[in-house]
Amino acid sequence: MREPIQNALDTGSDIGVRVDYGDRSVVVEDYDSEGVEDLSQFYDLFSGSKQYDPEKRGRFGRGVKEFIGATDEAVVSSTGGGLKFNFDTIYDEALDEYRVESSREVFPDARRDRGTVVYGSNSDWSEDDLRRVEDFVSDLWMPRDRELRLETRRPYSEKVITGGEPDAILENQYLPTIVFDEGVQREKHRSTSVEVNKAEPGEGGIYEMGIPVTREEEFPFLFNVHQKTPVTERRNELDNSYRSDLMRSLLDNRLDLLDDR
């Protein structure tokens, strides 16, 4: 879910997410005025360009493709038209084994006036899987000028997640980020801003442009870094030195956020 959500966040528009426990499906929608004209971006690997922008969340052009690969059926609709992906598991009696047959259909007339909708379903997704999607979406750190509408069905619920004023903003923090130089990924220090919210000890965490990277940190703060962080391949871990850099920035700039304890 991280992939289509980070794409929606990168558009700069509001976002809608729907989780349906009935048909085991998830929908992510944005309202970007341009949308996506070139539908091949949804199935060609390494076709993205966000890896060259440290203030965009994408890295390798994988994006929605990882989400599509986890579904039985996926439908994408944008300003360039529509796509439908199907993955069927077939038992081959002659070989006495199961194999997956996939198909991709293009629907030019399914184009939207604006924005992109990504739908995916999988009969093997459990209620716990979908609950984790809800938790992930609820934990996003939304920008202050945008909102996310989270809708669940069967049972029905709805809530709007908006960004609030942080407890502090650390400007011009010189932190390592990820850049690509002639196709090679490397780290580079770059000036950025960091939003900070106080938390209970053991409930700290680090966000990358609103998307949670680490949780249950011992320090009592939530940091939202406004550029790519040097995360691992699975995007859920950072070197301890990065944690030290963030705490050092806090201590140098806003010692008042700490209590006596």
Image: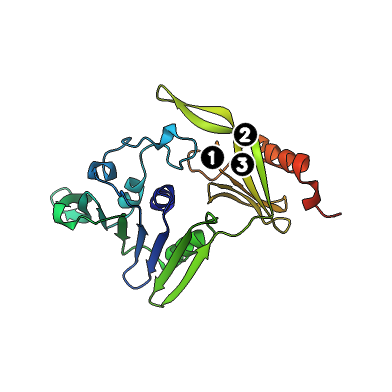
The residue at 65%/36% (across/down) is 173
Q: Secondary structure at mark 2?
A: strand
Give the vertical position of 243 relative to 110 (above or below). Answer: above
Find residue 12 and report its horizontal and vertical position in percent.
43, 50
Q: Look at label 3 and name its amino acid.
A: Ser
Q: Is residue 97 left or right of residue 223?
A: left
Q: Establish if 225 lies above or below 138.
A: above
Q: Which residue does the image show at 44% across and 66% down from the upper left?
A: 149
Between marks 3 and 1, how big is the CA–CA gap? 8 Å
- Residue at mark 1: 227
- Separation (CA) of disc 1 from disc 2: 9 Å
Where in the figure is residue 81, as x and y percent of width and height?
20, 52
Q: For the residue labelled by badge 1, is the local secondary structure a helix, a strand or a loop?
A: loop
Q: Position of residue 148 (x, y in %)?
A: 46, 62
Q: Which residue is mark 3?
A: 193
Q: Amino acid at mark 1?
A: Gln
Which residue is labeled 2 in the image?
175
Which residue is at the front of the view, 207 or 133? 207
| Residue that appears at 73% across and 43% down | 250
Distance, label 2 to label 3, CA atoms, is 9 Å
Asked if marks 2 and 3 touch (Cβ < 8 Å), the reply is no
Horizontal side of residue 131 vs 25, given as left or right: right
Among numbered discs 2 and 3, the one appearing first in the sequence? 2
Of the pair 147 and 41, the residue shown nearer to us: 147
* Of marks 2 and 3, the one in the foreground: 3
Label 1: how many residues lie within 10 Å, few (<14), some (14-19) or many (20+)? many
Of mark 3 and mark 1, the one earlier in the sequence is 3
Q: Amino acid at mark 2?
A: Leu
Q: Position of residue 221 (x, y in %)?
A: 69, 52
Q: Is the residue under label 2 in contact with that under label 1 (CB below 8 Å)?
A: yes
